[in-house]
Image (spheres, grey):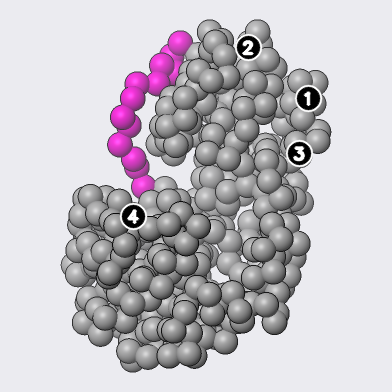
Amino acid sequence: MKILFTGLPIKEHILTSFNLVKELKKRGHNVAYIISEEWENKVTEAGALYIPYDNYPIEPKKHHINRLQFRHCVETTLRVGYEYDCIVFDADFYAGAKIAHKLGKKYIRIYYDIAYNTTTIKKFRRYLPFFKRLSLTKPFSYFFALGEAGRYKKELNISDIVNELTLSTISDLNISFVSKTFQPENTSFPEKNYVFTGPSMENSKVSCIIPFSAMNDAIIFISVGCKTDSKFLNYCYEAFKNARISVIIAFENGANANIIGPIPDNFYVYPAMLPKEVLKRTDLFITDGSSAKINQALFYGIPVIVYCNSRTDYYLAKRVEQLNLGKKLTKKELSLGRLRQIVIDLLKNDTILDNIIITEAETKLMGGTLKAADAIESYIAK
């Protein structure tokens, strides 16, 4: 089968999709991937044919970049999509189903984050920044779709963003890379066309040596994205620098760890994303409100502290607390005493540790990338 992946350059989404691309290639399918040019090498390494956005400007204006990526992705998918048997699109690229429908192709929507329907979008929307919240509120959703899809909005009959994101009937097959347990409002997604696979956990290449043998018994892993503020990191340094624990910090976007001062002896700092397998050796995970990272920790049975650096982190942080799988920490709550206390509580909280064991078992049984590939093959074969 010829399968076309298409979507927007969202880092965590793309990295997860590559595992699926590799699995489909291994099963003998021809796979192509439409994405922005900075991902060309990664696409070819995954074994797929790379297709750049058509007519994309060499130096796009930054304040127009998201809109341009969306429109040029639409243009490219419309041009090449007719050559493929099935179109697999990122749920954030909400024009994907309409493009496939226009071309008369089968199509699959993938949620690399939590899945959305009318119920979840209403609850999640309140935590978004003003303009993003407005874009998911009718009737404004219509005008935001007009801005992103441009002339293709009418051609593809896109009514508004909310409809395209939430209608369960928009795709015969919807795949989500989160666990069914962790998915908010999980009973509101029909089983006939929603498949929850759990996180994609294929082994990664270890590009650095992590001296676990030299570390103390308790190990904390802190995953630092570009939006994590230096104040929080300074508190981590101060809270744990004299403690009988070891702390691993991964600066995923190559940020300079030294901007927050000298590194304590019990800290191990890396200026890049570390492989997910590091979680196997850790006792506690501190991260932002990324469902991919949270689900990876649950896969390895690690309690989670979600640091809410922005409003959007609250939604999944509350889900973590609701399921008794960890704790949230807000900017207002941030202090040395509070940070230390949460860590101590999580490492000794029997209720949370018992729930983590159960969730770990459920998550590992979900199937991940293999289940997603099975679902795609079954759907295409119908």
Decide: is 299 above or below 132: above
Tell me whether the residue at label 1 lies in contact with that at label 2, contact meaning CB atoms closer than 8 angstroms: no
Q: Which residue is mark 2?
A: 241
Quick one: label 4 or label 3, which is nearer the N terminus? Answer: 4
Decide: is 210 above or below 46: above
Label 4 SS: loop
The image position of residue 71, as x and y in percent, is 41, 73
Residue 218, picture quadrant: top right
The image position of residue 118, as x and y in percent, is 68, 76
Quick one: label 4 or label 1, which is nearer the N terminus? Answer: 4
Residue, x 59% and y 74% (percent of image)?
144
Q: Which residue is mark 3?
A: 330
Q: Marks 4/2: CA distance?
A: 44 Å
The circle on residue 59 is: 4
Q: Which residue is mark 1?
A: 335
Camera-nearest label, 1 or 2:
1
* Left or right: where 140 falls relative to 31: right
Q: Marks 1/2: CA distance?
A: 15 Å
